[in-house]
Image (cartoon, rainbow, N blue to C red):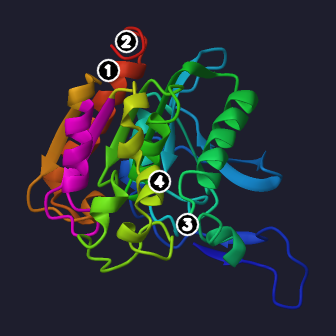
Amino acid sequence: WVADLPGRDEPAGEIRSATRLSVANERLLADVEVVEPETFTFQSDGKLLDGWLLRPVGFEPGKKYPAILHIHGGPMFMYGYAFCHELQLLAARGYAVFFTNPRGSQGYGQEFCTAIRGDWGNRDYRDLMACVDAVLERFDFIDPERLGVAGSSYGGYMTNWIVTHTDRFRAAVTMDCIANGYSFFGTSDLGYDDLFGLGVPPWEDPLRYLEMSPLHHIARCKTPLLIMHSEMDLRCPIEQAEQLYTALKVRGVPTEFVRFPGESHGLSLGGKPWHRVYRLDRIVEWFDRYLQPASGPRGE
């Protein structure tokens, strides 16, 4: 596309005209439906945050739908009004999908980006829960009893944190995650970095590292959790997932562990095609098992 936009010395405005230059993927798009994100805003701790929601493909007014909160990695990353194949797949399988940029994300200034330094699982968690509240208030077609949550990397950390601090989600998927900040130190390709921004290594402040580690709160977890991790992940080593899986099995929480041989931290975008497809299939299967109408009571 080529668009005619307001110039540097003109007031901001909408696109005046747009001309399509190619027909790439025209035949494919004739057979599939791509959902356009709906933008909304909400308040959290007095701050105005952005959110986006994808309605399920074939949306029918008056019908109740399950919904999935998807959390980005980073935390210094950001979502926006953009295409994401994973989110579109979930929408195509009958799920509403919503996402936001909690404090710690990029794109909103330095203060916003560093707001969770030394304080993971606090302000970011409150922002994500405020997003859930806002979505349930604005979109009455979402069934509050059929909520899921998923994320990779930092998004996996926050998924782990969420299921160890609330049981409002019926199922969760954590991918290439962090579970134990103490053992993460010195084993990641990040080097000798203090994970949570505490400014000291874990042996100088072990209790703070443990307090910000989801594994430390695992006794609270009741949510069925699918764990997926790449065996060659150097950013978030697979021992993080192994500890989490073992703890959930000991606790009797429904869980499954999928390992991807030869894959790295970038599996979702750069992995072997068959691994990427299998990963997406397992995400959908897990949520179908717990969030679709035929599912049993929470945790079954």
Check disc 1 and give the amino acid type: Arg
At a point 19% along the width and 56% down the height, the residue shown is 238
Nearest-to-viewer mark from 1 and 3: 3
Mark 2–mark 4 contact, CB under 8 Å?
A: no
Task: Between residue 213 and residue 63, name the one nearer to us.
Answer: 213
User: Can you give x and y, in whole percent of width and height, for residue 11 in the image?
Assistant: 91, 80
Which class describes the residues within 10 Å of circle 2: few (<14), some (14-19), or many (20+)?
A: some
Q: Which mark is residue 118?
A: 3
Residue 281 seen by the camera: no
Determine which residue is flagged by label 1. 289
In the rendered image, the residue lying farthest to the front is: 204
> In the image, 171: left or right of 82?
left
Q: In the figure, residue 130 lies in which quadrant?
A: top right
Instruction: Determine whether the residue tagged by mark 2 lies in a helix, strand or loop.
Output: loop
Q: Which mark is residue 295?
A: 2
Instruction: Looking at the image, tell me whether mark 4 or mark 1 is earlier in sequence order.
Output: 4
Residue 96 falls inside the magenta stretch? no
Instruction: Looking at the image, tell me whether mark 1 or mark 2 is earlier in sequence order.
Output: 1
Instruction: Looking at the image, tell me whether mark 2 or mark 4 is earlier in sequence order.
Output: 4
Determine which residue is flagged by label 4. 212
Q: How many marks?
A: 4
Which class describes the residues within 10 Å of circle 1: few (<14), some (14-19), or many (20+)?
A: some
The Cα–Cα distance between marks 3 and 4, rounded to whole angstroms, is: 9 Å
Q: In the figure, residue 16 lies in which quadrant?
A: bottom right
User: Can you give x and y, in whole percent of width and height, for residue 114 in the image?
Assistant: 62, 72
Check disc 2 and give the amino acid type: Ser
